[in-house]
Image: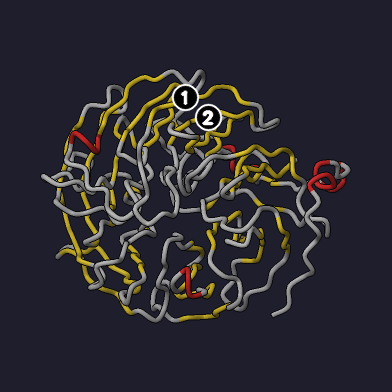
Amino acid sequence: MEYPPLPSFDPTLRMNLPSTSRWRLKRPAWMALLALGLAGEPVRATDWPQFLGPARNGSTPDRIEPWPSTGPRRLWKQSIGAGFSGPVIRAGRVIMFDREGDEERARSLDLATGDTRWTHRAPTRYVDGFGFDNGPRSTPATTTNRVVTFGAEGRLTCLDLFDGRAVWTVEAGKSLGADPGFFGPACSPFILGERIFLNLGNREGSGVAAFDLATGKLLWKATDHEAGYASPIPTSDNAGIVFFTREGLVLTDLSGNVGATHRWRSRQHASVNAASPLMVGQEIFLTTCYDTGGILLRRGTLGLETVWSNDDSLSAHYATPIQHAGFLYGFHGRQERGPELRCVEWKTGKVRWSEQGLGAGTLGLAGNQLVLLLESGELAVAPAVPDSFKVRDRAQVLGRGTRAPFAIGEGCIVARDPRMLICLGL
């Protein structure tokens, strides 16, 4: 396919586009009724308060209008430290988690200006054994008054959303038999009710665990599974948690009772399960690379049954796919080998289209539009339709090596590469 020409990336020009060049995110009127529960509290429809957005599935009801040929307008930029942690948006704030020198750093930035409201620092000695990056991989989770971070050495920290004060800190890794894995702990915390859920990956029965949001107390732990770098999601009825460990699927109730498991692990030692699971109704989709592939499971009265599985439909390396209107959209194949972007039928695993040449990246869904942030630093928008792939808008917004997830909220998109954090929007 043909793409529209890329505009030159001139930061000065982008900062001074006239008001007619705004990149607008419109919300349907019914979105005012949306109440997605994080910590039992309503979330504003335009917030992106955690990894994978308000519904923990990479989507937002907001719609992105077409932008001009010069691309979306950049509101501000900030230098960023080490790590692959993505930004989150909550109540006019951007929460970032990175590493500066020998400290992990959580920051609250003003969404409109990029000005720092508060900074919380904690010492770290983590060293990436592969030499990729010594910063945190985990994206923070927020409630209406709390921020929860999970550091590269397994430190779980709860901060006050408004002033950055430390409410409590738990050395979850050290206290529960930490296993550094390949890249250190990387699970993004999930908050539901008054509990924090983690794919912890520790020994001694601490593969998955839950902590009390108010105190940091360990509430329960289960399994001996290593972590797979995927983050947990809620079941469709919010009555349980879906974990994708290195061994495969683990379903628990909110009290930690394991209800079902399904092994889905590569036979290769040097492998990870990094994309988070997806759940639609009573069906759960898992995907990974390393000669393993994707599997759709259905919960029934007799346990889990396989709907389909193969290594040919959608084998995601690290980016969690999107499910929309009965179709999966995601990157198929290893990051270093040049994956393909694909559309796959949810019910059958049939590939509807496959697009080469984009490279790896992360993706989200805004309304019915796919939003792609590629490792090249390009941002692209395309309709999420099963007939064909056609880019509507495309622009170079960041530098190479862009791998962290992005956030869409309050009329903005916030994204980072290894050196810079940017905010695009009104």
> 131 or 138, which lies in front?
131
Label 1: state its secondary structure.
Answer: strand
Residue 75 position within the rendered picture, expressed as x and y whole percent measured from the top left: 74, 39
Residue 131 position within the rendered picture, expressed as x and y whole percent measured from the top left: 41, 54
Inspect the image, locate mark 1, and give the three-letter code of the amino acid beneath it.
Answer: His
Label 2: state its secondary structure.
Answer: strand
Residue 117 position within the rendered picture, expressed as x and y whole percent measured from the top left: 59, 22
Q: Where 288 falls versus 168 (above or below)?
A: below
Q: Where 327 falls versus 407 (above or below)?
A: below
Q: Where 205 falls versus 38 (above or below)?
A: below
Inspect the image, locate mark 2, and give the three-letter code of the amino acid beneath it.
Answer: Arg
Q: Which residue is mark 2?
A: 107
2 and 1 marks in contact (CB < 8 Å): yes
Q: Earlier in the sequence, mark 2 or mark 1?
A: 2
Left or right of residue 175: residue 242? right
Q: Which residue is mark 1?
A: 120
Q: Quadrant of the C terminus?
A: top right
Left or right of residue 103: residue 71? right
